[in-house]
Image (cartoon, helix red, strand yellow):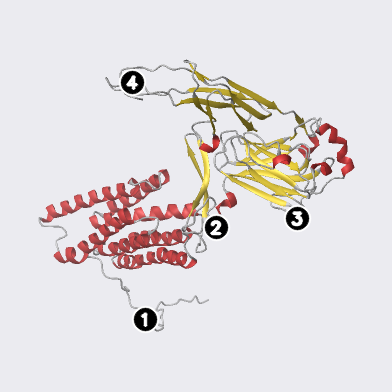
Amino acid sequence: MPVLEPGVAMPQTVVSPAKVFVPKHAAGMQFELRSCVTSEQKACAVRVVLGSITLPQSFQRIITCVGNVNCSLALDSPPWEKWLQIMVESLGLPRPCLGEVLVLAVLTPLLFCFTACRPGSASSFLNFSSLNQSQAGPRPGSTGAAGSSALPTGEASRNVSDQRSFCLQYQPVVREDLDVVSVRYRLLNGPSVPVHSISPTLLLLNLNTGMDSGGSLTSMSLANATVVACVSAASPVLSLNATQNCSTAFFQGYPLSVSTSSAEAMLIVLYPQTDDWFLSLQLICPKGQGECNAAEAKVTVFAYLTPCFNDCGPYGQCSLLRRHGYLYAGCSCKAGWGGWSCTDDTKAQSVGAQNLATLLLTLSNLMFLPAIAVAVYRYYLVEASVYTYTMFFSTFYHACDQPGVAVMCIMDYDTLQYCDFLGSVVSIWVTILCMSRVKKILKYVLFVLGTLLIAMSLQLDRRGVWNMMGPCLFALVIMIAAWVYHGVKRRHCYPSSWKRWVFYLLPGITLAFIAISVYAFMETNENYYYTHSTWHVLVACSVAFLLPPRDKHKKPWAWSQKLTCRYQICQNDREELYAVT
């Protein structure tokens, strides 16, 4: 919004927007601007922009008209059933002087002419028998499709006179929603489409539902004759036999070509725009159009919409994203791979790098073995069980989480991830509570209650920040309160031994602090394999230092009795009584 200031001239150009509705079956549109004059009866120069001003420049047509000369613009295949925006902007207007207001009207008569197209249907009645036919037909990608041969000329010549009166032939297509962002288009009159040279055969692929964002539109043609095809949005191409140019008024289509030497053609459109898509097919004769006026070719067409092309391959995962009520589909690539379907190996990791990353992330969990040994030696069997659980599931989760060839999953990925997160948080929880040295009954109650609450919070939000920080802070509060209680009761610092602080607590706290810093501030997608492995090692080593010593009344692990290695003869001194009769 311009700001007007006193004494400052600010020229403004006011554009005059307009729009015209393009009817269905419009083969062309002729735009003409006649004798541009101003209100002072002077010749003027204007610039006319046809198309949306919010879309890229390829969706616009711009012409400049100067003076009284009529200028025109012809648009082939304008978008059907759309409002075409028209903006007329005057060029070269005189600038107002200071304190003056320039009021100037530009008169530009506009003339629009449409060329209508008379469509013809594939048949005079709907073939309902095709609805009950077997679905075991040729699948997309197969080569031996039935009906891929040219029909005799005599059979097709009976329809030549009827075809001359139509500019296109419609083929009925049914849209079948198979799954989320997964659609198959099926022809009602069979998998084969008759194609002629006089008028193109048209197939409507409806992607105008508003729920097909993302995905890949795949069109496959099998033929035994020379056929050119064009896939376009908003409007079809109706003059393939004349120019063989696959473009409409505002859209560059996707050309296809099949012949006897190349009987299969495939087209994949990534992220097709929401609109009506058209597949135009027409028979082309290299020697002249007259020799194939009475010919007919059978082309087998498969068209379907998939959320991700080729299921993103071995280095990606097809993901769905819902935002503002719209569902999007795309590939999430790993191991440095990129591209629409994770096929770009410009920054991809080698197989050796993938194996090294897997070994680092899995074998680094073996550093929990010293912590488990210390816990068992000091009679902390529950804590040792938790560390064993964490080591096991962290190892196999990272073995399953890797992309490419270095992957091993012993169970469902989601289950492994949940168990790994649960074991990590519970390990921190039980370690800090063990350091607090509270009564056993209270400690085990807190173990069970905290584990249940942690499991619930992880189910609600697995990657939430407070799922780890919450239990850690609460356990630290309990530990500090317990240490203060012990210190007040004994009337000296707790723990009281300086050796405990210097050789165990301070190294353990330092390792834990470094591990948290690496995890929070240094870990990225590029160095994840190294930093996360370092996190495993530092956390496991800190646990071995932070575990408190065993209770004084507990003895080291030893056999309570020595086993004897000899036989002993047991003698029964009981007297036996016999009855004498």
Q: Give, as a three-letter code, the residue at label 2.
A: Pro
Q: Give, as a three-letter code, the residue at label 4.
A: Cys
Task: Tell us which disc is closer to us: 4 or 3.
Answer: 4
Do labels 2 and 4 touch, CB within 8 Å? Answer: no
Within 10 Å of the Cα at label 1, are there few (<14), some (14-19), or many (20+) other Cα atoms?
few
The disc placed on residue 314 is 2
The disc placed on residue 261 is 3
Give SS at disc 1.
loop
Q: Earlier in the sequence, mark 1 or mark 4?
A: 4
Would residue 191 be found to the left or right of residue 446 on screen?
right
Give SS at disc 2.
loop
Task: Tell us which disc is closer to us: 2 or 4.
Answer: 4
The location of residue 143, given as percent across then percent down, is 74, 54
- Residue at x 46%, y 17% (from the top left corner): 105
Within 10 Å of the Cα at label 2, are there few (<14), some (14-19), or many (20+) other Cα atoms?
some
Give the residue pinned by disc 4.
97
Within 10 Å of the Cα at label 3, are there few (<14), some (14-19), or many (20+) other Cα atoms?
few
Do labels 4 and 3 touch, CB within 8 Å? Answer: no
The disc placed on residue 334 is none
The location of residue 547, given as percent across then percent down, is 26, 62
Q: Give, as a three-letter code, the residue at label 1.
A: Thr
Residue 428 in view of the camera: no
Do labels 3 and 2 touch, CB within 8 Å? Answer: no
Q: Earlier in the sequence, mark 1 or mark 3?
A: 3
Q: CA distance from mark 1 to mark 3?
A: 91 Å
Residue 100 in view of the camera: yes
Q: CA distance from mark 3 to mark 2?
A: 33 Å
Give the residue pinned by disc 1.
564
Within 10 Å of the Cα at label 4, are there few (<14), some (14-19), or many (20+) other Cα atoms?
few
